[in-house]
Image (tube, rainbow, N blue to C red):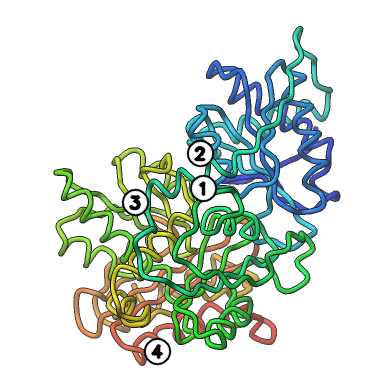
């Protein structure tokens, strides 16, 4: 029996093409998706979109074939961002599949799948069953249904842009000069359509300065992964050189956005979560509703602090978009944010969209006269390490060393511990205030560390102490920062 566990994991499909993920696999997964997601829900059609990777069109053809073999129709929306696919799923009420490997290098591809209404497909909501059935189809072949499904095409880019503009009107803000780095990813298609006039929408008071808007899945300029600071260098330099008000960087499938202020400094995802979250809290309260904001457990403490002060409620959740989306729907939350710059909106089908988050920041900046550095500074009061990755031979042993030092021996005094997602140790209730989270990667022999403290020296001390324990005994202190 074929084994698809290496590429079908907690949230999506992701693998090397063609070594792990080829057209035969895509065809089998398409047939399984039709059987597990579309047919039981009564859906007669599946929306499929794809990014600019060279392997995407062939994989989409194969997946479409699998879906139609099982008697379900296919709506192909062509090149789009992942949130563009979510828009199609949400607005049309159909299940969807987006072919992308997000920020991964060019040799990868994958699929992000959703139920109708852009509801996530994760291991507990269909993905495990899809994997099992796809393995059987690869082994035994796919039976054709009595009626084959049809395939039609529709361009939804203008509809997507128009919908986002109804959620965050930008017509009356002050003129802003905006540098956008698309990283040769799908932001090169969506930014001109939503923020410009490429899709036929009216001109906004934005001067867009493009970086790497050419769609090229080989990523000739830099990886489309703005979480790595090395991939923000060009944008930071361009913002300063053009005396821009703001810089925006999108990842490969443009469902995440990273923000640079007018000085060329990065604005943390936690600060953006607080900024957008407080705007949504104010709107909800004005409408007479009690707002709830979702944040993951490695987001800055500033988010729950400021939301509570503003009269909102917060819910802390595990890392990962399927967990955030589940909590968003369960609590009818108006907004959610992650440290990785995924931002989720109730008014966008509880799904994540980098473009809508960018528009909120543009509106907040354009409604007042101060520069972004001053506007965002309020939301960045603490020192954050960012995510520090360490290659670890024996993950359980490394974790035990940290537990022994910080929890059992209490070298730093009494701490609070939880294991909602990895190991979180908090000293926030007493001076000096700090906390850290240590999580093992689901896919690699890595430990991911995030530290926050009220002061830089405290953060550095805690960070270095944890890293020394994690990396103890590793050859050459092997690590990836």
Numbered label attached to residue 120: 2
Secondary structure under tag 3 reads strand
102 with respect to 336 (left or right):
right
Secondary structure under tag 1 reads helix
In front: label 3 or label 4:
3
Pointer 4 or 1: first along the chain: 1
Pointer 2 or 1: first along the chain: 2
* Mark-to-mark CA distance, 2 and 1: 22 Å
Is 138 drawn above or below residue 428 in the view shown?
above
Numbered label attached to residue 188: none
Query: Residue at label 1?
Result: 161
Residue 267, quarter of the rendered image: bottom left
Residue 134, quarter of the rendered image: top right
Is 239 drawn above or below residue 157 in the view shown?
below
Query: Residue at label 3?
Result: 335
Query: Residue at label 4?
Result: 461
């Amino acid at each position: 029996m074929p084994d698809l566990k290496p590429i079908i994991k907690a949230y999506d499909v992701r693998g090397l093409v063609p070594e792990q993920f080829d057209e035969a696999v895509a065809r089998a997964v398409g047939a399984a998706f039709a059987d597990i997601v579309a047919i039981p829900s009564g859906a007669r059609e599946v929306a499929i979109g794809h990014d600019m990777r060279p392997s995407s069109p062939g994989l989409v053809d194969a997946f479409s074939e699998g879906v139609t073999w099982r008697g379900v129709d296919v709506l192909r929306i062509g090149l789009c961002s992942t949130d563009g696919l979510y828009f199609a799923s949400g607005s049309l009420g159909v299940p969807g599949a987006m072919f992308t490997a997000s920020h991964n290098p060019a040799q990868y591809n994958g699929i992000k799948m959703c139920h109708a209404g852009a509801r996530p497909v994760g291991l507990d909501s269909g993905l495990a069953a899809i994997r099992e059935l796809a393995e059987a189809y690869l082994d035994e072949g796919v039976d054709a249904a009595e009626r084959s499904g049809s395939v039609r095409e529709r361009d939804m880019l203008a509809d997507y842009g128009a919908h986002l503009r109804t959620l965050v009107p930008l017509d009356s803000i002050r003129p802003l000069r905006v540098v956008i780095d698309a990283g040769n990813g799908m932001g090169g298609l969506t930014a001109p359509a939503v923020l410009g006039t490429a899709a036929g929408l009216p001109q906004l008071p934005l001067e867009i300065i493009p970086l790497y808007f050419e769609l090229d899945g080989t990523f000739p300029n830099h990886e489309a992964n703005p979480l790595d600071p090395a991939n923000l260098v060009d944008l930071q330099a361009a913002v300063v050189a053009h005396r821009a008000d703001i810089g925006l960087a999108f990842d490969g499938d443009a469902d995440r956005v990273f923000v640079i202020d007018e000085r060329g400094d990065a604005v943390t995802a936690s600060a953006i979560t607080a900024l957008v979250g407080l705007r949504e809290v104010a709107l909800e309260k004005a409408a007479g509703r009690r707002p709830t904001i979702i944040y993951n457990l490695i987001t800055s403490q500033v988010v729950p602090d400021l939301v509570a002060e503003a009269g909102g409620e917060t819910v802390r959740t595990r890392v990962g978009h399927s967990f955030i989306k589940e909590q968003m729907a369960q609590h009818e939350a108006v907004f959610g944010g992650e440290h990785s710059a995924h931002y989720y909106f109730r008014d966008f089908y509880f799904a994540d969209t980098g473009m809508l988050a960018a528009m909120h920041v543009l509106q907040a900046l354009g409604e007042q006269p101060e520069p972004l550095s001053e506007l965002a500074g309020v939301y960045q009061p603490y020192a954050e390490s960012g995510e520090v990755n360490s290659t670890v031979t024996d993950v359980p042993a490394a974790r035990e060393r940290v537990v022994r030092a910080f929890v059992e021996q209490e070298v730093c005094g009494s701490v609070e511990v939880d294991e909602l997602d990895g190991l979180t140790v908090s000293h926030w209730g007493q001076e000096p205030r700090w906390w850290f989270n240590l999580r093992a990667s689901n896919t690699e022999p890595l430990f991911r560390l995030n530290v926050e403290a009220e002061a830089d020296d405290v953060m550095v001390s805690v960070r270095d102490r944890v890293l020394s324990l994690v990396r103890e005994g590793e050859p050459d202190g092997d690590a990836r920062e």
